[in-house]
Image: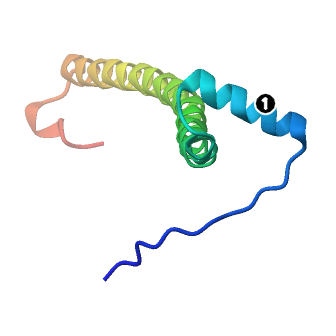
Amino acid sequence: MTDSKQVQIIIRTTKEEKNEIMEESKEKGVSMNEFIKEKLFGSSKKDINSDINDSDNDITIDIIDILREQVSIKDEQIKELHHLLYNRDTKLLESPKHWWQFWKS
């Protein structure tokens, strides 16, 4: 069974602050209580989500750049290794050895 009782919270403000809250709530077309609850609960969730998304995007972009650079370096290394293997195999075939001597170092 959930407790669905509503409780009252008292907030002490100056008259100017109260007037400002009243004006902003009227502009949005909601009561002062709804306006205050919306500001407290709505903005905190949005701020947390936007902070998480912003920090994730910043880190993710940096990581992606680093990984792309590493992949391009690895591609060059693989290309050079293929070239070296090809040259080695070509030299083995060109060397004047008898067929039984190919496997000797």
Relative placement, left or right, of 82 versus 23 is: left
Indicate whether 83 appears above or below 31: above
In the visual, does 72 lie left or right of 83? right
- Name the residue at 88% across, 39% down: 15
Q: Residues within 10 Å of mark 1 (few under 14, many from 20)?
A: few
Q: Position of residue 74 (x, y in %)?
A: 43, 28
Residue receiving disc 1: 20
Name the residue at 57% across, 49% down. Answer: 41
Rendered image quadrant of residue 76: top left
Could you tell me residue 69's position as x and y percent?
51, 23
- Establish if 85 lies above or below 2: above
Q: Horizontal and vertical percent for residue 46? A: 54, 39
Of the residues shown, which amino acid type is indicated by label 1? Glu
Q: Nearer the viewer, residue 99 or 29?
A: 29
In this view, the residue farthest toward the left is 99
At 49% from the left and 28% from the top, the residue drawn is: 64
